[in-house]
Amino acid sequence: METISVDVVIVGAGTAGLNALHEVQKRGGHAVMIESGAYGTTCARVGCMPSKLLIAAADAAHGVETALQFGVHAGSDRRIDGPAVMQRVRRERDRFVGFVVADTEQIDASRRLRGDARFVAPTRLLVDGWVQVDARAVVVAAGSAPWIPQPYDGIRERLLTSDEIFDLPDLPESVAVIGTGVIGLELGQALHRLGVRTTFFSPIDKLGPFTDPQVRRVVRRQLESELDLHTGIEMLQVTESSAGVALRWRTPAGEVREESYARLLVAVGRRPAVARLGLEATGLALDRNGLPAVDPQTTQCGDAPIFFAGDVGGHRPLLHEASDEGRIAGANAASWPNVQRHERRAPLAIAFTDPQMALVGRRFVDLPGGTSAIGAASYDDQGRARVAGRNRGLVRVYGEVGSCRLIGAEMFGPGMEHMAHLLAWAVQQKMTVQAALAMPFYHPVLEEGLRTALRDLARELKALARCRPEDFADAPGD
Amino acid sequence: METISVDVVIVGAGTAGLNALHEVQKRGGHAVMIESGAYGTTCARVGCMPSKLLIAAADAAHGVETALQFGVHAGSDRRIDGPAVMQRVRRERDRFVGFVVADTEQIDASRRLRGDARFVAPTRLLVDGWVQVDARAVVVAAGSAPWIPQPYDGIRERLLTSDEIFDLPDLPESVAVIGTGVIGLELGQALHRLGVRTTFFSPIDKLGPFTDPQVRRVVRRQLESELDLHTGIEMLQVTESSAGVALRWRTPAGEVREESYARLLVAVGRRPAVARLGLEATGLALDRNGLPAVDPQTTQCGDAPIFFAGDVGGHRPLLHEASDEGRIAGANAASWPNVQRHERRAPLAIAFTDPQMALVGRRFVDLPGGTSAIGAASYDDQGRARVAGRNRGLVRVYGEVGSCRLIGAEMFGPGMEHMAHLLAWAVQQKMTVQAALAMPFYHPVLEEGLRTALRDLARELKALARCRPEDFADAPGD
């Protein structure tokens, strides 16, 4: 057995792990990074990048299908070349992954170990049973893996997750999408627009990430107008054959229905990849999912010299958060036992459906009772959205009554990825609604819809008479 | 002769005039608004809205033409239905104009006069020679009109400006666009993408609004790859016939060339519509264009009780600025002689070309020598832009060395209308580059390209060692 002693050992060479390594080395620490799988981040390999590539093809197909409203006739022999669609997705994905892999391989080989890492003591890991790594502190950045629940975990040949779908040589004839969360809706809507017969199933009634009942209502109405959605169902039987997968389910009305699909896409979420880490050897208190409690501002687990960063920590499984957590974990592991708290960025989550979905700051369910106000704006008739034939959606913006500060939003509509950045920056700066209304809004832009919501919020706050009315006197946009 | 006495008389019922009227009435003032033409704003009737409608059709056509890169075949018999394109433009435009006209007509008829207004004394106007209006203060919001210079002002039948182009029943076979500024490029590129043979001519070498030589270089390379551009030419002869317009011009190399087009679109800018206002009767000092000096913070002309708002003032001929100026002018006219200064919003100008163009805050030519630093990012390989097949452009961001504050940007690339809002809000808030880097940037988004430019700027500022290095220590995005 070989034994290595380092300041910091990092489990996982994804976004969080790479950032942690960089941070330790920047501080002069001695670190080693262990990876059990292929190099390349979840984002580049199976997440953000390939999904956006598939969506880009779906956008192109949707643009062709809807061009007639503008006086543009697509040809009668228009068609989608499935292998070509998937080839572009893979070619571009491989390019993005290639950069990450190249960067990773440029790291000094002595700093990289390949193999399965397993805790044998709080700061001691065994790699593939033959290398022992002792460290002053550990960064766990082991990532996440798609979760495949009952009764789908018996399916093998016909089952896809977001880890496999981008490797299909062609678009399937039909897909049953299990899950109507962000990943299910993003991928399923893209497949639908690329001509794949697509049906969505979920045992719960939720579509996307929203908690605001008014936004949820608009989302449901809009998505139901395009997609074949079956929510609130009970899946009774899943049978695999050489031709495909037969599903039998009970509708909320109690009716039993059956249908077959070429493929099953299970997209019910990802789970922290901790099964083989031997976390019980850390001495940390673990919950029933086998996970320790992690402080998001330090990434530390309790008082231990163990730091969880990225998806494995389960805080906000998003690339930009994984980057930050990697840096925080690296810094704190390197300076252990001197652990510093770091301000986190304003929450920002975006789903690249059409219309897009976004959550900023506090969600509706997180609003403090009695001290918040809500402003709303529909995009159903918003000027610029209507010009582009994309006038659908609802934005709800939340403000704090005492301070008149913007504290959050749930957003569904065109270009919400951009509106959400504007608002997330405002929330992080603790901007008041009247300050936001004093900012420039061009014309005609989608941002004017956001302004409508901000004006509505300003009226609400004024009506609640807990913000000083004179604060609103000079809001030029009001 | 009828005589009316009011607190404020407003000349023009466009965006600035309507806002001024609203502001005067809100303050309990007695106002009358005079309009010589049809109701409806420049923006709704001939500006922002119809141009964006034409561009929306062009986007659809361009999407169909470029879908193949994603594996989507648009069909061999695809075609553009010119009358249908123009019908949608007019239908939607008429709807937008209809709202403005209805709002205007809901104003008490005693507050509205129709006819040509002409100063006969500093605060006395004559309307069509038969109604005399006396006021304590005057708001001039007479708008602007397309300028038609020599040698094009002799052309009648075949000449279009942005005031007429949207009323064409069909797309023309070909168009010579005179002018490569914002309006010429927006409309001309749209026509080109809608299958119109389009050639651009300009006596100067400028494309769009940019002053930054590096941005200008990228703009030229990009636009030349798509459009037939003839800049730096001398137009020798313009001849109109029943078939079209024949142009003869000298190239920068001295060669004389000739070509004929079905239509001539003159888009060399708009000029304040003051010719018939009789401004000489105001006693104001007028420049050689017949215009008084206007203070942008008060909209006042010198010490007179005369306020210029909107395009006629020539400050920033943009809808959102006209709105603000109308409100400022209305407030100051109503409270005359108590004139207040108002903070203006951070400068923001966007051109809806593809890629889009935007100016934020200070332009390159306005940078103070020696105390500014520049950060840049190309969009030629930006992740999300590449996913969408729109990876072209350059962003240059300007910062102040002493304060590390963001002070401006010139931007050319996809989605710049949104990037420009984010940056304009930051500039108005006097945000530092390190504060901007601490804000959330999602992945994969176009905003990450902006972040690349901000990081570059942060490096420059650090290198110049006039910002304290510790200010950068905790920029989590850096």
Image: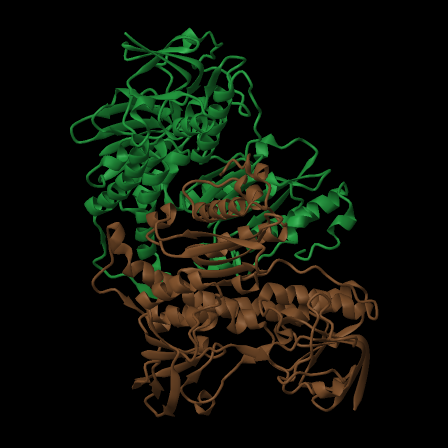
Chain colours: A brown, B green
- Which quarter of the image is occupied by the C terminus of chain B? bottom right
The percent position of residue A289, horizontal first and vertical second, equals 62, 84
Q: Quadrant of residue B351?
A: top left
Q: Is B150 above or below relative to A224?
A: above
**Residue B98 visible somewhere in the drawing:** yes
The percent position of residue B203, horizontal first and vertical second, equals 40, 27
**Residue B259 visible somewhere in the drawing:** no
Q: Nearer the viewer, residue B406 or B240?
A: B406
Q: Quadrant of residue B160?
A: top left
Q: Nearer the viewer, residue A176 or A222?
A: A222
> What residue do we see at 42% from left, 43% from top?
B223
- Which quarter of the image is occupied by the N terminus of chain B? top left
The percent position of residue A156, horizontal first and vertical second, equals 44, 90
> What residue do we see at 38% from left, 89% from top?
A236
Say whether residue B351 is left or right of residue B379. Answer: left
Q: Is A364 above or below relative to B302?
A: below
Say whether residue B136 is left or right of residue A134. Answer: left
Say whether residue B434 is left or right of residue A366. Answer: right
Circle count: 0
- Residue at the extreme left of the image, as rendered: B242
Q: Nearer the viewer, residue A338 or A453?
A: A453
Q: Is B308 above or below relative to A58?
A: above
> What residue do we see at 34% from left, 75% from top?
A198
The percent position of residue A288, horizontal first and vertical second, equals 63, 85
